[in-house]
Image: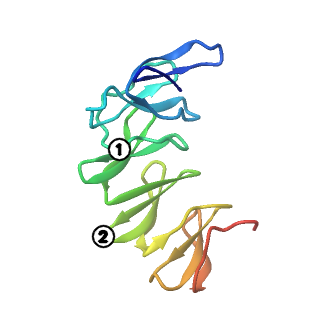
Amino acid sequence: LVQVGNNTGMINTKLEYAIQPVYYSLGTMSDDGVTYFRRSSSDKNYGLIDKDGKELTQMMFESAPEFDGGIACVTQGTKVGAIDRKGKFVIMPKYDELENMGRGRVIFKESGRYGMLDANGNQILSPMYASIGWFLEDMASCSLTGDKYGYIGLDGKEKLPAIYDAAFTFNCG
């Protein structure tokens, strides 16, 4: 990213403008070659732009989409959904919370409980948990009650029962 005056653009490895410095803000380019933009400080919404400077969507998202694994979570109104890199909804904005965990998994909150979807919006795990942590080494801490913790896998199945007073990000397994 480069800034010229109050405007932001992006240069490529040939040291040429890939995106002209005409934007108020640009996000970090994802591996998919897509990021978000806003044209001015008064803009409330964000749009999508590709690595060649082509605007893929209008400025229609209330949160800045950050892509991981080909999708990004976005807010519309009071609900959250997920879009693909073309700006098409792959998970409709109907959830209270949505967190892209990468590896094709998305954690959602509905009626105060957490569950899990795949990157296409198919439910893997119904919303039954009080909390679900980040996946690392294909495992995430979880709690049904908020006072005892265990671990689930990417398939949504319990790997260790909720018998622990605390459980942290699974590491060095």
Q: Identity of the amino acid at label 1?
A: Ser
Residue drawn at x 50%, y 41% is 67
Q: Position of residue 92 (x, y in %)?
A: 33, 48
Q: Would residue 99 be found to the left or right of residue 32 on screen?
A: left
Q: Identity of the amino acid at label 2?
A: Ser
Residue 52 shows which numbered tag? none
Residue at the outermost right position:
172
Residue drawn at x 55%, y 43% is 69
Q: Position of residue 104 (x, y in %)?
A: 55, 50
Q: Secondary structure at mark 2?
A: loop
Q: Secondary structure at mark 1?
A: loop
Residue that numbered label 1 is attached to: 63
Residue at the outermost left position:
77
Residue drawn at x 35%, y 44% is 63
Q: Is residue 67 above or below residue 157?
A: above
Of callouts 1 and 2, the N-terminal one: 1
Q: Would residue 16 be found to the left or right of residue 72 on screen?
A: right
Q: Position of residue 53 (x, y in %)?
A: 46, 19
Q: Nearer the viewer, residue 54 or 153?
A: 54
Q: Nearer the viewer, residue 78 or 13?
A: 13
Q: Position of residue 11 (x, y in %)?
A: 56, 19
Q: Residues within 10 Å of mark 2 (few under 14, many from 20)?
A: few
* Label 1 close to label 2 by CB (< 8 Å): no
Q: Residues within 10 Å of mark 1 (few under 14, many from 20)?
A: some
Residue 111 shows which numbered tag? 2
Residue at the outermost front position:
5
**Which tag is nearer the camera, tag 1 or tag 2?**
1
Q: Would residue 121 be found to the left or right of residue 96 on screen?
A: right
Q: Nearer the viewer, residue 35 or 7?
A: 7
Q: Would residue 60 be found to the left or right of residue 166 on screen?
A: left
